[in-house]
Structure formats: C-alpha cells, structure tokens
Image (cartoon, rainbow, N blue to C red):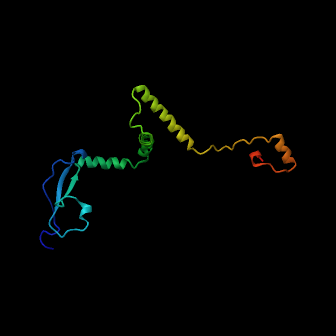
Amino acid sequence: MPAGAGQRGLARPLPDLLAHRGPADRGQVRQEPVPPCPARAQCTTTADSARTVGFPPRELRDLQLRVRAEQQTPEWKTRYAVRSGVEGTVNEFAHGHGMRRCRYRGQGKAHLQHVLTAIAVNIERLSGLPPAEEAPIPRRPTAFQSYLDQRELPRLKSWRTLGS
C-alpha cells in the first residue's frame, strides 16, 4: 500500500457545532487521498471527505447505559404503557383533529371547541368498538305471521323475525 493511501488520522478538534446534543468530545477524521469511491455521495457531502465523530463524556454514557437497561424491565414497561396511551391521545388530537391551533378567539370559545372535539373523538372510538356479545332479543311474531307459520305458508322477507 503506498504511503498515505487509505490512512486515517485524527485532525484538529471541532468547534462546538453540535451543542444541542449535549457535551461531547469531538474530532474529525480525514482520509488521505485515495482513488474516488463510487458511493462517496451516499456517505459524506463535505468537500474534503472529512467525518465528524462525537463521544459523550463517560458519566453521560454510563447514565445512558443504565437507563436503557432499566427500560427493558417489566416494571418500566408497565409504567410507560400509561404514558404511551396519553401520548397517543394527544397525537390523535393534534394531528387527526387539528388541535394545534384554535379556531376561535377567547378562552370560553376555545374551551367549548376542546370539549366538543373530545366528545367527537369519544363517539368515533365507541363507534369503532365491536358490538356487544349479547344477541338481540327477537320480536314475537305478529298474529298474521303466526297464522302463516301454522299453515306453513311462506312469508315475505320483510315479515320474518329473528327467532323464526
């Protein structure tokens, strides 16, 4: 391998460009001149093919590992199930019913909009439930239907009851 081809070296530390992600030790990895890669555009968009690498401080990394391990316990999943249901409802209101913005001005009208929207969501949810397990009680046949049944005469479909 020719000298410098494919070697990577740690360059100068980067300025704090990713401050929103929290404290981290950062560095840039530069690639020495090598033949152009056909998939380079999928990997990096920088002109000099530099990569930015960040490493969280040890305390933050230990905290992340501890919290991720805790999230695998059944107790945590049980507690999170409640939050998940609430978050789903909030998401349904915000995205499904346009509740990010109020249609009316004034606290009274806004409150009314929220209450009516909540009622509409509850009606939607109830209409999507499967019917009750109990079978409906059939109507008793009318006197005329009983007369037809005794003589074994066919009835119109609209005259048939659920019980016969």
Compared with 27, 159 (above or below) is above
Q: Position of residue 53 (x, y in %)?
A: 21, 55
Left or right side of 158 for 18: left
Give the percent coordinates (x, y) of residue 159. Answer: 77, 45
Q: Nearer the viewer, residue 68 or 120?
A: 120
Indicate the position of residue 158 as horizontal and vertical percent values: 74, 46
Q: Is residue 42 left or right of residue 32?
A: right
Q: Nearer the viewer, residue 13 or 33?
A: 33
**The residue positioned farthest toward the bottom in the image shown:** 1
Residue 53, above or below 162: below
Given residues 97 and 77, the one toward you in this image is 97
Q: The N terminus is located in which quarter?
A: bottom left
The residue located at (64%, 44%) in the rendering is 133
Relative to 163, 13 lies left or right: left
Residue 80, by quadrant, is top left
**Residue 86 falls left or right of residue 54:** right
**Could you say where residue 18 lies in the image, as x and y percent from the top left?**
22, 48
